[in-house]
């Protein structure tokens, strides 16, 4: 008891679609890896994840430094600027 021709053709069509999707996905991955290398000099997803982690830490530290500087600015100039604006 095998499959009939109609079922075979349906399965073949599904397989062909999946092959095309896989080829498209491989092409997209290859393009993204080239972009990763060209823009950041990174050659693997693992290296990109490590770099992203470092960038996020740098962003967090910059945010803290900004908040500290802004607070100091407000403490020194806030009242003077408010008075000048009134």
Image (cartoon, rainbow, N blue to C red):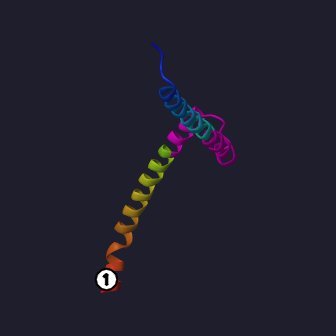
Q: Position of residue 36 (x, y in %)?
A: 64, 44
Give the quadrant of the N terminus: top left
On whether residue 81 falls in the magenta region, the answer is no
* Nearer to us in this view, 75 or 6: 6
Q: Position of residue 65 (x, y in %)?
A: 45, 54
Give the quadrant of the C terminus: bottom left
Residues rendered magenta in the picture? 27-55
Query: Which residue matches tag 1?
Result: 83
On whether residue 32 falls in the magenta region, the answer is yes
Residue at 44% in and 48% down: 60
Q: Position of residue 78 (x, y in %)?
A: 34, 73
**Label 1 Cα crowd, 10 Å radius (few <14 / some 14-19 / many 20+):** few
Residue at 32% in and 79% down: 82
Magenta: main secondary structure equals helix
41 relative to 1 in the view: left or right? right
Q: Residue furthest top?
A: 1
- Placement of 40 over or under 5, stated as above or below: below
Residue at 69% in and 47% down: 38
């Amino acid at each position: 008891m095998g499959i009939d021709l109609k079922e075979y053709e349906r399965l073949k069509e599904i397989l062909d679609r999946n092959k095309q999707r896989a080829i498209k996905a491989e092409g997209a991955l290859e393009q993204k890896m080239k972009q990763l290398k060209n823009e950041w000099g990174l050659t693997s997803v693992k290296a990109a994840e490590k770099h992203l982690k470092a960038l996020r830490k740098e962003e967090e530290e910059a945010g803290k430094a900004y908040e500290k500087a802004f607070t100091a600015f407000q403490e020194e100039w806030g009242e003077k600027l408010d008075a000048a604006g009134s």
